């Protein structure tokens, strides 16, 4: 069910629980700012979720409240994950859903990295 990204952060969301080690995942990457893991229901041959370690509901929330160092560290982590996975050539897609119209399901900022095949148009026609 889509969430409203303007609500306060929910410490019981699944990504917060993954960050605390309460729920196992297939970890791909971790540093001071980001944690990345394979999606349990991949929508492409490569489907990695990248989440900031801080408590942010959405990209809007993150860009408004996170310190510049944290924003830069997270964005750099997303790029590093794609490079280290060899996705730059032939290409990949980044997706961050925000709020109910986008279909955001987990109230913790997350970026999807999709790759491994031609992905087609950005939105269904």
Image: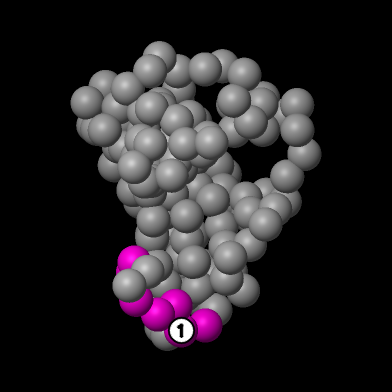
Q: Residue at x 38, y 60 (%)?
A: 94
Pick the front one: 27 or 99: 99
Whole-percent x and y of residue 121? 34, 76
| The quadrant where residue 78 appears | bottom left
Q: Is residue 33 shown above or below 118?
A: above
Which residues, given as a range, are shown in magenta? 117-123
- In the image, is residue 100 part of the stretch drawn in magenta? no
Whether residue 68 is visible = yes
Q: Position of residue 99 (x, y in %)?
A: 36, 35
In-front residue for pair 17/122: 122
Q: In the rendered image, which residue does mark 1 sit on?
A: 118
SS state under label 1: loop
Q: Residue at x 62, y 19 (%)?
A: 12
Position of 30 with respect to 87 (left or right) is: right
**Mark 1 crowdedness (10 Å alpha carbons): few <14, some 14-19, many ≥20:** few
Q: How many marks?
A: 1
> Which residue corresponds to the image point at 47% horizontal and 36% vertical from the top-left?
2
> Percent position (x, y) of residue 70?
34, 33
Q: Is residue 52 visible?
A: no
Q: Quadrant of the C terminus?
A: bottom left
Across and down, in percent, residue 4 comes to: 38, 27
Against 65, residue 81 (above or below) is below
Question: Which sits in the foreground, 118 or 82?
Answer: 118
């Amino acid at each position: 069910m889509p969430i409203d990204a303007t609500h306060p952060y929910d410490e019981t969301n699944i990504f917060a629980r993954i960050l605390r080690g309460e729920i196992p995942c297939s970890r791909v990457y971790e540093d001071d700012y980001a944690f990345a893991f394979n999606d349990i229901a991949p929508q492409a041959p490569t489907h990695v979720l990248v989440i900031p370690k801080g408590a942010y509901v959405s990209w809007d929330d993150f860009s408004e409240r996170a310190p510049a160092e944290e924003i830069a560290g997270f964005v750099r982590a997303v790029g590093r994950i794609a490079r280290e996975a060899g996705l730059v050539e032939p290409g990949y897609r980044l997706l961050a859903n925000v709020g109910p119209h986008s279909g955001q399901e987990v109230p913790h900022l997350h970026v999807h990295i999709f790759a491994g095949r031609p992905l087609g148009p950005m939105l269904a026609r």
